[in-house]
Amino acid sequence: MVHEDFTLKGRTIVVTRPRNQAEETMRLIIEKGGNPYLLPTIEIKSSGLSSDIKKFADALAKGEVDYVIFMSVNGVEHLLKAAENLGLGNQLKRNLEKVRIVAVGPKTAKALEEHQIRVNLIPPDYTSDSVIECLRQQGVSGKAIWIPRTKQASSNMAEKLHALGSAVHEVYVYESHLPADPKLATQFLQDLSGGQLHAIIF
């Protein structure tokens, strides 16, 4: 809990989130008198193949999906953006209402709810292991589970769900890369060595 008299006056705080996800953190820093210093350590790009998105949409429409697990805000936004680009946005949202939706945490749940998509389950610990444990307790043997995710994510969750008897399908909707512009990193190192930075938020 942050005390009301807490201040960051005169402090420069490095924010490493992607630019489009850093607004809230930067706003809070400014409210406390600090200077936000944006240094995205990854860039997020859409990567979903049209054929994969259509396959997922078709499975939803045919009632062949029992659960959809969203492990990040990026998974939500990039799936819906890809579906919208294919003219399947409204159809996808309607059909998502017919299945059980799992969100890894409250931020992911909020992103879904902002698109009028009901969330059925949020695990208590906001981790993949906690998601798996909740589904194990519900009994998912024989259930079809889809996971919109990044190409770079571990296959550990899918493997554990397979071990529970589920049919698991992963649909890649985005990927992360190191920032393309090296100038940001060069400037950061100069500012860090010059003592101009006071804290880094990862």
Image (tube, grey):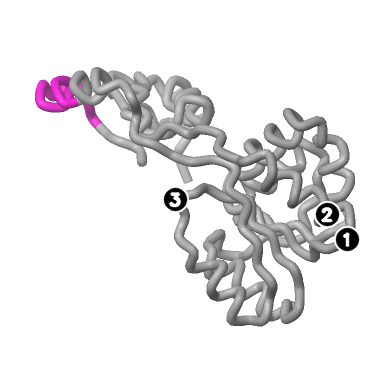
What residue would you read off at disc 1? 63
Taking depth in this image into account, of 22 and 159 the one nearest to the observer is 159
Taking depth in this image into account, of 59 and 178 the one nearest to the observer is 59
x and y, in percent, of residue 51 in the image:
69, 44
x and y, in percent, of residue 29 in the image:
42, 26
| Among the two numbered marks 3 and 2 on one chain, the one whose residue lies closer to the N terminus | 2
- Left or right side of 136 for 120: right
Q: CA distance from mark 3 to mark 2?
A: 25 Å
Where 2 sits versus 180, above or below? below
- Left or right side of 202 for 95: right
**Residue type pointed to by label 1:** Gly
What residue would you read off at disc 2? 60
What residue would you read off at disc 3? 152
- Residue range (magenta): 189-198
Q: Is residue 165 visible?
A: yes
Q: Name the residue rendered at 63%, 64% in the picture.
A: 123
Tag 2: Cα neighbours inside 10 Å, few (<14), some, or many (≥20)? many
**Residue type pointed to by label 3:** Gln
Q: Secondary structure at mark 1?
A: loop
| Among the two numbered marks 3 and 1 on one chain, the one whose residue lies closer to the N terminus | 1
- Left or right side of 46 for 57: right
- Residue 123 magenta: no
- Residue 193 magenta: yes
Residue contact at pointers 1 and 2, CB within 8 angstroms: yes
Picture quadrant where residue 178 is located: top left
Residue found at the very far front of the displayed protein: 51
Picture quadrant where residue 110 is located: top right
